[in-house]
Amino acid sequence: MAVDRPNFRLSDAERTQALDALAEHVRTGRLDLPEYDERSASVTSAKTRGDLAAVFADLPDPRPEVLGPAGTVERVPAAVPVPSLGRRLAAVAVPAATVLAVVLFFTLGRFGIFVFVLPIVVALLAGSLARQRH
């Protein structure tokens, strides 16, 4: 949970609001009395917003206004772009051409080192095809 300006000091009104929120969590059954005692002591001694955030880290709303609502910081996964057909073809064709060049080099021997031109040509063709479709 990210708190806006965690090093800002708390006011008495914000501590009172935090104690009221803890009392509500006791009424709803989320906290028992010994845990309320511990957390209320932490709220009373809290100096900054960051100190207060630790007390409410595992509790939903209600929360003190200084911390904001519980669900405000939610990470949404970024949409992964789907590669085009040309890019997918290039991603498969270049490694396949490289493997083919290695196999030809060891099996046909007479072409010598020139078989390694094949992956370069395939990479250039695949790259130009991908750019034309883009």
Image (cartoon, grey):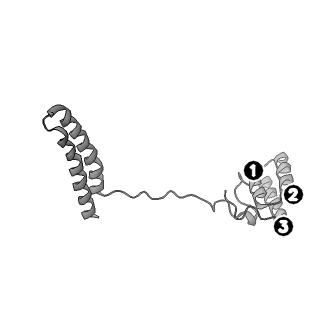
Nearer-the-camera pick, 61 or 3: 3
Mark 3 residue crowding within 10 angstroms, few (<14) / some (14–19) / many (20+): few
User: Alpha-carbon distance for marks 2 and 1?
Assistant: 20 Å
Q: Which picture quadrant has residue 131?
A: bottom left
Q: Earlier in the sequence, mark 2 or mark 3?
A: 3
Residue at which label 1 appears: 30
Instruction: Identify the image quadrant of the C terminus.
Output: bottom left
Residue 55 coordinates in the image, percent (x, y): 77, 53
Q: Earlier in the sequence, mark 1 or mark 3?
A: 3
Mark 1 residue crowding within 10 angstroms, few (<14) / some (14–19) / many (20+): some
Q: Earlier in the sequence, mark 2 or mark 1?
A: 1
Residue at which label 3 appears: 11
- The amino acid type found where label 1 is placed reads Arg
Nearer-the-camera pick, 27 or 82: 82
Instruction: Identify the image quadrant of the N terminus.
Output: bottom right
Q: Which mark is residue 44?
A: 2
Residue 65 coordinates in the image, percent (x, y): 74, 66
Tag 2 and tag 3, C-beta contact below 8 Å: no
Q: Which element type, helix, strand or loop, lies under badge 2?
A: helix
Looking at the rendered image, the disc whose residue lies closer to the viewer, 1 or 3, is 3
- The amino acid type found where label 2 is placed reads Thr
- The amino acid type found where label 3 is placed reads Ser
